[in-house]
């Protein structure tokens, strides 16, 4: 899977994603991450990509031109890699069009749909994802209308830019790409699987400051352990996220 991040701060996202699981996944070739600096597509020597908003108001707005040119750069690179034409249409050996698919562009914005595990699972099926990170007071609406396919938020609060949300989204999606996790089963049964929170986890020692590991986990009886974990997941979800049980109809 290939992630392309359109950003004003490429070092920020690359430094954050080059460690831990995502870093290993890149090194092992399971995913690729490319941060494209929108300033490189400015048409002035100072690399300015923002201007005052029409109609007045506080702050600055990112101009449409640099964003669009950065997007076109990424789209062209995707076409080169996949053997598509300028319209991102895949061509077979007989010069027949066999696919017409625009790359999916995710704009990270507090106005978007709140990101969740279901969305992560859907996006993990894509071969390429472009994540657009805004700054200042946002991005000129015209270019958003031209290139954005999805608006996503990581919560009902405002951050200084889209870089941290983009990193969150990439981290969550990457875990679902085959080969990224050492134990592929763990991605399937973690928190939010089947709209349930994950059961409590324990490791050595068996006793810590007077608190013991539940006996059932030491029994070796897999059926009983599975039943205990399911019960704990239900109880924890009821206490902490009852809204998830409503989605299950419980």
Image (tube, rainbow, N blue to C red):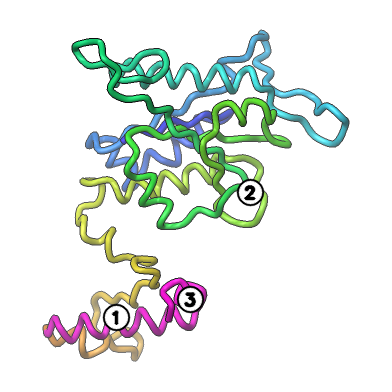
Label located before the other in sequence (3 or 2): 2
Q: Are marks 1 and 2 in contact (CB under 8 Å)?
A: no
- Give the magenta-colored segment's residue range: 221-250
Q: Quadrant of residue 38?
A: top right
In 3D space, how far apart are the residues under numbered discs 3 and 2 (Cα atoms)?
Answer: 25 Å
Q: Residue at x 66, y 55 (%)?
A: 157
Q: Mainly helix, strand or loop, the magenta region?
A: helix
Q: Position of residue 236 (x, y in %)?
A: 42, 81
According to the picture, the residue beneath numbered tag 3 turns out to be 246
Closer to the camera: disc 3 or disc 1? 3
Name the mark on residue 110.
2
According to the picture, the residue beneath numbered tag 1 turns out to be 230
Q: Few, some or many C-alpha atoms within 10 Å of disc 1 (few <14, some 14-19, many ≥20)?
A: some
Closer to the camera: disc 3 or disc 2? 3
Q: Position of residue 225 (x, y in %)?
A: 20, 83
Q: Is residue 133 above or below residue 187?
A: above
Residue nearest the observer in this picture, 156 or 164: 156
Name the mark on residue 30.
none
Label located before the other in sequence (1 or 2): 2
Asked whether, in this view, residue 191 is left or right of residue 187, the answer is: right
Q: Position of residue 46 (x, y in %)?
A: 68, 13
Asked whether, in this view, residue 223 is left or right of residue 199, the answer is: left
Q: Residue at x 28, y 46 (%)?
A: 177
> Does dot 3 land on a helix, a strand or a loop?
helix
> Does dot 1 land on a helix, a strand or a loop?
helix
Q: Is residue 69 above or below residue 58?
A: above
Asked whether, in this view, residue 70 is left or right of residue 136, the answer is: left
Q: Few, some or many C-alpha atoms within 10 Å of disc 2 (few <14, some 14-19, many ≥20)?
A: some
Residue 244 on the magenta segment: yes
Q: Residue at x 43, y 27 (%)?
A: 102
Residue 248 on the magenta segment: yes
């Amino acid at each position: 899977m290939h992630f392309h991040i359109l950003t004003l701060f490429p070092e920020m996202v690359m430094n954050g994603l080059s460690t831990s699981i995502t870093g290993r996944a890149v090194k092992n070739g399971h995913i690729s991450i490319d941060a494209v600096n929108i300033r490189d597509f400015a048409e002035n020597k100072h690399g300015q990509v923002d201007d005052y908003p029409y109609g007045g108001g506080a702050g600055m707005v990112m101009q449409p031109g640099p964003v669009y040119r950065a997007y076109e750069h990424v789209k062209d690179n995707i076409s080169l890699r996949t053997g598509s034409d300028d319209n991102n249409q895949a061509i077979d050996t007989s010069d027949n069009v066999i696919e017409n698919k625009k790359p999916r562009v995710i704009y990270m914005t507090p106005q978007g749909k709140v990101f969740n595990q279901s969305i992560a699972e859907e996006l993990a099926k894509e071969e390429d994802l472009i994540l657009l990170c805004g700054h200042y007071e946002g991005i000129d609406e015209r270019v958003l209308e031209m290139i954005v396919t999805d608006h996503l938020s990581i919560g009902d609060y405002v951050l200084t830019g889209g870089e941290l949300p983009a990193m969150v989204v990439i981290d969550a999606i990457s875990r679902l790409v085959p080969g990224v996790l050492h134990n592929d089963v763990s991605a399937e049964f973690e928190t939010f699987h089947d709209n349930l929170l994950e059961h409590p986890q324990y490791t050595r020692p068996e006793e810590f400051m007077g608190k013991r590991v539940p006996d059932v986990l030491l029994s070796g009886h897999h059926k009983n352990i599975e039943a205990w974990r399911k019960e704990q997941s239900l109880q924890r979800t009821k206490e902490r996220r009852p809204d998830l049980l409503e989605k299950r109809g419980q």
